[in-house]
Image (spheres, coloured by chain):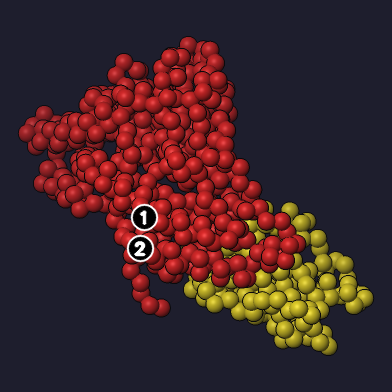
Amino acid sequence: MEKLSTVYADNAATTAMSRTAVEAMLPYLDKIYGNPSSLHSVGQRAKEALEAARADIAACLGARPDEIYFTSCGSESDNQAIRSAAHLGALKGKKHIISTAFEHHAVLHTLRRLEKEEGFEVTLLDVHSTGVITADEVKAAIRPDTCLVTVMFANNEIGTVQPIKEIGEVCRAAGVTFHTDAVQAVGHIPVNVAEQNIDMLSLSAHKFHGPKGTGVLFCRRGLRLLPFIDGGAQERGKRAGTENIAEIVSMAAALKEACANMDENSAKLVKMRDRIISELVKIPHSRLNGDMAHHLPGTINMCFEGIEGEGLLLLLDDKGICASSGSACTSGSLDPSHVLLAIGLPHEVAHGSLRLSLSEYNTEEDADRIIKAVPEVVEYLRAMSPVWKELERGERKHLL
Amino acid sequence: MALYSEKVMDHFRNPRNVGEIPDADGIGEVGNARCGDIMKIYLKIKDGIIEDVKFNTFGCGSAIASSSMATELIKGKPLSEALTLTNKAVAEALDGLPAHKMHCSVLAEEAIRAAIKDYYDKNGIAYDKAQFPDPDETEAR
């Protein structure tokens, strides 16, 4: 088969590291190898780099350096934030948590465990067909025993962005801790913990051209945080374990770069995204998911009736295009993605979903190839689909 | 992609016997759209031999490959032989399927059985009911 160059359109899954991020990391793999906890000069050089990275990341988020805790990933940050707030709430007899139906599993599965094993009560807010909730809905759900509200900044599958500042305001007024999983947002859209009334925030480096295996938990000064890994005094006793210096330094470099170029990148992505959408919505019986007025610049999620997503991905991969889907076959379970079901899509439709997530490394030529390939592949799969034939013959009702 | 064997990818990329047979002697459809898998098999039968077979499938790569392979395995064969086709044989002919995709080969076996049963029913041919268990019950076992 002809070898095609790769069109990587799965940046919500992970991104390629930037040159800046790779180069920032290199000296810390060999030359500056010290343990930041060591008193000697070799250790202190590493310590300086660690604290510089902390200050840089804090500046990007509108936080103070002592509010930044390094973790191993976004999922760890979510776990620690939620468990800490829940357990501190329980000490005051508050065991009610509010979240949404389409959170990442790092949040949903943590909440489910708290519910099942520790008797917490969880309210999952409906996210409507738009994939956007309102601060008023959060306000209405807050009870005297609510200890935590956790709402994702931007959804990883459909790309919708929540009114975080307003939700934060409501929580602050009610005296309830507010955590946001901002893994898809940080480095892509403006995030400022002070202005947006955020108490706790999770981020992950590999979503903004940083390395995999490192992340951050922001926890507002004055808010108690329970340790997640017991051991040494690293991260002010909240997260033991020798710091992953090379990756932390690299993450800081990647975030600084992403934030410095955010406006430019965003404008480029929105243009590319909207051009792709305007072409792909011409495919009959398709649907664009998520309210585009509140949206990440680079994410596109669509459903195509009569086909299943895995075949779509495999055939796009043959054409050099990397994408993802929320179909059951790609989720590894019998049900399609909980996000697509949460926005009210029927199973039949959710199986035929496609997520394209762009980064500033994509080109207009990439967009051209996507625009050409997707309709071809959809048509090909529909031509052998008994479901599509029934739809065409009127034996089955079109849902899109 | 390393998810599937080369054989699976070959049958997925170049599926054999795709289509419908307008004057089919037997048609079998199994699965449902809600679960993300539907297989429909069409048979043309003469003197107890499967002269032609076509399929349409809504489903993942391994569902399409399983349909393609199953139709290859029964084309030109007597019905009695087609009835002995097992999902394992389909999966083996594809050089294996990932564990969570084995149900695709089960669907292929069931779709063929359903098509043969349809042929028997339409032509008033007597058969042993035990040979045609309800697919829903098979799934549950």
Q: Position of residue A344 (x, y in %)?
A: 61, 42
* Residue depicted at 12% across the width and 43% down the height: A32
Displayed quadrant of residue A308: bottom right
Q: Report the front residue among A248 and A123.
A: A123
Q: Position of residue A161 (x, y in %)?
A: 43, 37
Can you name the residue that lies furthest to the left here? A41
Q: Report the front residue among B12 and A140.
A: A140
Question: Element under label 2?
Answer: helix
Q: Position of residue A257 (x, y in %)?
A: 21, 44
Instruction: Give above or below for A173 relative to A114.
Output: above
Q: Dots 1 and 2: beta carbons under 8 Å? A: yes
Q: Which chain is yellow?
A: B
Question: Element under label 1?
Answer: helix
Q: Residue type at mark 1?
A: Met
Is residue A376 visible in the rendered structure shown here?
A: yes
Instruction: Give above or below for A343 relative to A194.
Output: below
Instruction: Give above or below for A336 relative to A374.
Output: above
* Residue depicted at 72% across the width and 86% down the height: B76
Q: Residue type at mark 2?
A: Asp
Q: Which chain is red?
A: A
Tag 1 residue: A272
In what quadrant of the picture does the N terminus of chain A appear?
A: bottom left
Q: Chain of mark 2?
A: A
Which dot marks residue A366? Answer: 2
